[in-house]
Amino acid sequence: MQPKTHNSNSPDDRGYFGDYGGRFVPDTLMAPLLQLEQAYAELSAQPEFWREFESMLTNFVGRETPLQYASRLTEKLGGAKIYLKREDLAHTGAHKINNAIGQILLARHMGKTRIIAETGAGQHGVATATAAAQFGMKCVVYMGAEDMARQEMNVFRMRLLGADVVAVNAGSRTLKDAVSEAMRDWVGNIADTHYLLGSALGPHPYPRMVRDFQSVIGREAREQILAQEGKLPDTVIACVGGGSNAIGIFSGFVNDKDVALIGVEAGGTAIAAGEHAARFAGGKPGIFQGMKTYILQDNDGQASPTHSVSAGLDYTGVGPEHAWLHDLKRATYTNVNDDEAVAAFHLLARTEGIIPALESSHAIAYTIKFAPAMKGKTIIVNLSGRGDKDIGIIQKYDGARK
Ligand SMILES: *Cc1c(COP(=O)(O)O)cnc(C)c1O
């Protein structure tokens, strides 16, 4: 099913959402990006492509995910009625698999047999390795050596799924170095390789394409809330790392002007250089990893270091469509700090029997502040993933505060 609701929000021919996005890459990357753009334009016009995608989402990913009324959380906060969009119940435990499946299908149609990806904490690497195994494709995941040491279990998981995990020893040995390595590989292996980027960011056409694959979240949520409440929600809340789960759910409501859209970024330990990842609170427009968007940068325009207790939100730049929605004031962006996110993690576990990902805990944390004053209103919170991957972090975090 082609995501029709997006027509008014498509980027222009050069890949700009308003002032943001574009394609700021070296000449060597233009050929693969143009090839990808053209292939996606052709395939996304074919209903069979979307039917194939939907079928994989149903049978492999386990969609649709429920929209669950969180009765005990609602009662505890005493304000708005709260619904949770349960992306944590998707295969592999988060929304990232939606995009991985979409891009693998596209790669297969393009005749590619080898998939490469970058990963930070390993979640996108796991989703990619999972999708590659399902389609019998070769998979190489680039990961900073520093991140590999911190995320041993995800490295093991990717290897179990048949992926080749390559340690990147350049630079700070983290995510941005892994992105550079993946791009280098792509340029050298265009004939058989697809670069499966993990969020709604980077150079055109990725932000739009990833948004389209994640828009299933918003499409389902809209139908589900209409079925359960008989009306649209007043507010939709989602955490924003690169921005894919948020833009996925927002896209279902962006044309409904009365539905408020709220993105929650990582406030870290303080809104001060190096201590957070709230691009809209501490950043400004600039160019980063192929796109123009809000980025955290110093006075010389150099990318600043970032921090969050949640690895998936710990990133320098935000997807360009969010930058556009921000400037249009169609969506608002706020942030919560590490302590608030961890408190929300505990509260949801005890109140609803759901252990949320630390990323998703940021959306819950803002809901805890926002919902009490909203009696009579309805909120949907996107629960982007489950928190099994985070229990070790929580154990240490709580231990350190005792
Ligand atoms: C990766 C991740 C995020 C952040 O990525 P977005 O592209 O902003 O969605 C959020 N939640 C979970 C569970 C993740 O794994």
Image: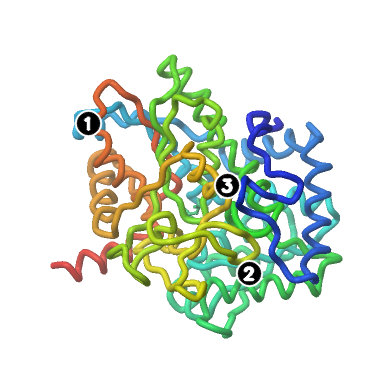
Check the image and report above or below for 189 versus 252.
below
The earlier-in-sequence mark between 2 and 1 is 2
Residue 166 position, x and y percent, is 62, 77
Q: Residue furthest left?
A: 402
Asked whether 3 or 348 is in front, the reply is: 3
The earlier-in-sequence mark between 3 and 1 is 3
Give the residue number, with chain letter if any, for mark 2.
Answer: 141
Give the residue number, with chain letter if any, for mark 1.
Answer: 373
Q: Write the residue at 77% across / 67% down.
A: 29
Residue 270 position, x and y percent, is 28, 64
Residue type marked 1: Ala
Instruction: Give the colour scheme shown.
Output: rainbow
Q: Write the residue at 28% across / 38% down.
A: 352
Side of 396 where 256 appears, left or right: right
Side of 343 where 166 appears, left or right: right
Asked if disc 2 is less than 8 Å from ligand 1, the answer is no
Check the image and report above or below for 298 versus 22.
below
The earlier-in-sequence mark between 3 and 2 is 2
Residue type marked 3: Glu
Q: Write the residue at 42% across / 48% down.
A: 239
Side of 2 where 175 appears, left or right: left
Distance in Å between CA atoms under marks 3 and 1: 29 Å
Mark 3 lies on a secondary structure that is helix
Residue type marked 2: Val
